Amino acid sequence: MTGQDIFIDPTRPRARIRPLKAMGHMRKLIVDKEDTAQVFYIIEALNGNSLEKNFRRALSTPEGRARFAARRSLAPLLDDHASFGQLAPDSVGRAYIDFMTREGLTAAGLVAESEINRAAGKRFDDDLSWFGDRLRDTHDMYHVLSGYGRDALGEAALLAFTHGQQPGRGVIFISFMGFREMRRVLPNSLDLKAVWREARENGRAAEKIVDQDILDLLHEPLAEARARLNIGRPTAYKAALRAYSELPTDVLDVSPA
């Protein structure tokens, strides 16, 4: 497949880097870490043409081309848990359902958050939008496969992992700022740099999750899927969790997630 085989709306504006806009939204996210719509604003302000670069990278692989040929919409599939079929207790799909239920999450909820950003501009019905949606809809699958939780440290680490998978200034900026906020309130004995470095390296070393057949992946044993995809253990993150679990208050509430 070549670049001529994909359609990118010619009316899309030229990608621009807007650091001041990103910083303004970052301040709002720091104040309210649950305001996840700010994440999409920041990514849009900083990523430039990263989405297109990552899309063309995916299309350079047989797996990515197969996903593009099918153009499956993931959000409805991931919320229709009954459609997963019979899942083994140790499967990726079972872990995903348990994670989403425990955290009170839905794929549709993440779509709604992203649409807040899109409401401010034009919705482009092109192949680049399809790829962007696929990246968004696999976010919580990244949690399940990588082992990073939804605590503030886990979310910041997951964004570093995501940058290793799909490079872009937006996600790494949010991750860096999250770790910086935590550094202000956590004891120096916690090696947050090790958590950040490990997360990025785990993301880089792993096979690209967005290229996978997600329906097949749901039925795969979780341990086997992690091994096949070469997803490393989040050892430094788990060590940090054990260390700050003994602190008297949840100081991590101050950081963006």
Image: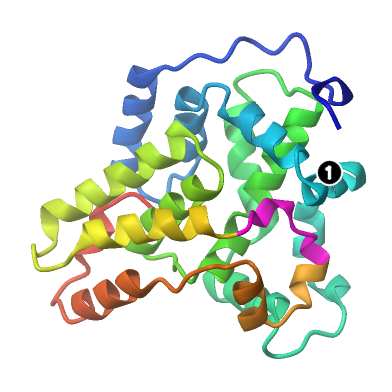
Q: Indicate left or right for 66 with 19 as reference.
A: right
- Which of 44 and 160 lies nearest the eye of the viewer? 160
Instruction: Give residue 16's position: percent from left, percent from top.
Output: 50, 14
Question: Is residue 55 visible to us here?
Answer: yes
Image quadrant in which you'd find residue 100 = bottom right
For the N terminus, give its image quadrant: top right
181 vs 146: above or below:
above
Please name the residue that numbered disc 1 is placed on: 65
Q: Is residue 132 left or right of residue 81?
A: left
Q: Which residue occupies the foreground of this view, 37 or 56?
A: 56
- Please give the name of the residue rendered at 42% of the width and 56% of the height, measured from the top-left corner: 201
Q: How is the image coloured?
A: rainbow
Magenta extent: 207-215
Residue 251, how many percent across, how many down? 19, 63
- Number of on-image labels: 1
**Toward which corner of the image does residue 88 lie, by quadrant?**
bottom right
- Residue drawn at point x = 52 percent, y = 67 percent: 146
Q: Residues within 10 Å of mark 1 (few under 14, many from 20)?
A: some
Q: Is residue 210 magenta?
A: yes
- The residue lying at 79 percent from left, 77 percent from top is 219
Q: Residue at x 30, y 70 (%)?
A: 236
Q: Is residue 152 visible?
A: no
Name the kind of residue labelled 1 in the image.
Answer: Arg
In the picture provided, is 215 more to the left or to the right than 108? Answer: right
Q: Is residue 203 above or below residue 123?
A: below
Residue 106 part of the magenta segment: no
Where residue 9 appears, as percent x and y from the top left, is: 78, 16
Q: Residue 163: image x %, image y %?
A: 48, 45
